[in-house]
Image (cartoon, rainbow, N blue to C red):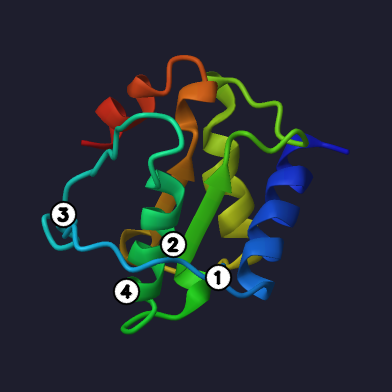
């Protein structure tokens, strides 16, 4: 299967399944800064479930199709940093009428995408 089609299927799967249950964390992550936010921490410390909490918070004001969640640990995803634009391309093909500036892209285990820092730098 072509990489873009794999990404589309990951996006569709996320949009059609409920968020996992999580334990509410007391930490507040700023969501209105207009900047990229990176969560770092020790392995198995709850970062993924904090992402779910953030998504749940965003879903109070947005529909789920405006969120894009990609877990870079998914074995189906064999992406290189120079192919990261395929994520945007796949989303645009699924939702051509969406304004990307109103979308949220949440990436889990992005360190598995060697050179991921370049993506964040270009977005600033």
In this view, the mark in front (3 or 4)? 4
Residue ID for mark 1: 19
Q: CA distance from mark 2 to mark 3?
A: 20 Å
Q: CA distance from mark 3 to mark 1?
A: 24 Å
**Outermost residue toward the left?**
33
Task: Give the mark, 1 or 4, whose residue is nearer the N terminus.
Answer: 1
User: Quick check: 76 above or below 69?
Assistant: above
Asked which secondary structure carries label 3, the reply is loop
The residue lying at 28 percent from left, 36 percent from top is 123
Asked which secondary structure carries label 2, the reply is helix
The image quarter in which residue 42 lies: top left
Residue ID for mark 4: 57
Asked which secondary structure carries label 1, the reply is loop
Pointer 1 and pointer 2: residues touching (CB < 8 Å)? yes
Q: CA distance from mark 1 to mark 2?
A: 7 Å
Tell which of 94 and 57 is nearer to you: 57
Q: Mark 2, residues whose alpha carbon is within 10 Å: few (<14), some, or many (≥20)?
A: many
Task: Give the mark, 2 or 3, whose residue is nearer the N terminus.
Answer: 3
Asked which secondary structure carries label 4, the reply is helix
Pointer 1 and pointer 4: residues touching (CB < 8 Å)? no
Specify the label residue 52 is tagged with.
Answer: 2
**Outermost residue toward the top?**
114
In this view, the mark in front (2 or 3)? 2
Q: Mark 4, residues whose alpha carbon is within 10 Å: few (<14), some, or many (≥20)?
A: few
Task: Give the mark, 3 or 1, whose residue is nearer the N terminus.
Answer: 1
């Amino acid at each position: 299967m072509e990489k873009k089609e794999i990404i589309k299927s990951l996006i569709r799967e996320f949009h059609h399944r409920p968020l996992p249950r999580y334990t509410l964390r007391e930490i507040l992550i700023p969501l209105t800064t207009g900047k990229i936010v990176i969560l770092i921490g020790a392995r198995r410390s709850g970062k993924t479930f904090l992402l779910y909490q953030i998504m749940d918070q965003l879903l109070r004001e947005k529909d789920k199709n405006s969120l894009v969640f990609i877990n870079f640990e998914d074995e189906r995803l064999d992406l290189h940093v120079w192919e990261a634009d395929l994520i945007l391309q796949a989303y645009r093909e699924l939702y051509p009428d969406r304004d990307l500036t109103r979308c949220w892209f949440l990436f889990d285990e992005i360190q598995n995408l060697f050179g991921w820092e370049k993506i964040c730098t270009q977005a600033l």
